[in-house]
Amino acid sequence: MSAPDTNTEKQEKRHKPALLGIRGAMIFGGLMIVLLIFYVIINGGDPTADDVTNTDQATEPEASVPAVDPVVPGTNESN
């Protein structure tokens, strides 16, 4: 049931801080979404030559040595 005598002007005055807070949160959320879209568009371009790295070449001398398998073929132990 609703109240028989509602005064919307009086209710609006009483709820003004809460309504301002809700409006501020909506503006803040919208601003964050716009900034996120702007950030993604700015950083979403093609990579430059400085951004691309070549990982095919070994940079450490240990990378060229093959790993030694500690388990001898033909045994059932795998310690």
Image (cartoon, rainbow, N blue to C red):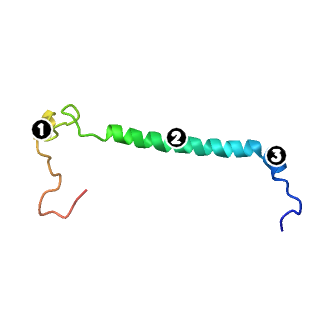
Identified at 83% across, 68% down, the residue is 1
**Which residue position holds label 3?**
14
Q: Position of residue 35 (x, y in %)?
A: 46, 39
Relative to 3, does residue 68 appear above or below in the rendering?
above
Q: How far apart are marks 2 and 1 (CA)?
A: 45 Å
Residue 75 placement: quadrant? bottom left
**Which residue position holds label 2?**
31
- Circle number at residue 12: none
Q: Identify which amino acid the numbered label 1 is placed on.
A: Gln
Depth check, front residue: 38 or 72: 38
- Asked whether disc 2 touches disc 1, contact meaning CB atoms under 8 Å apart, the reply is no
| Element carrying mark 3 | helix
Identified at 21% across, 61% down, the residue is 77
Q: In which quarter of the image is the C terminus?
A: bottom left
Q: Position of residue 57 (x, y in %)?
A: 12, 38
Crowdedness of circle 1 by 10 Å Cα count: few (<14), some, many (20+)? Answer: few
Identified at 71% across, 46% down, the residue is 19
**Nearer the N terminus, badge 2 or badge 1?**
2
| Element carrying mark 1 | loop
Q: Identify which amino acid the numbered label 2 is placed on.
A: Leu
Q: How far apart are marks 3 and 1 (CA)?
A: 70 Å
Depth check, front residue: 15 or 51: 15
**Which residue position holds label 1?**
57
Q: How far apart are marks 2 and 3 (CA)?
A: 28 Å
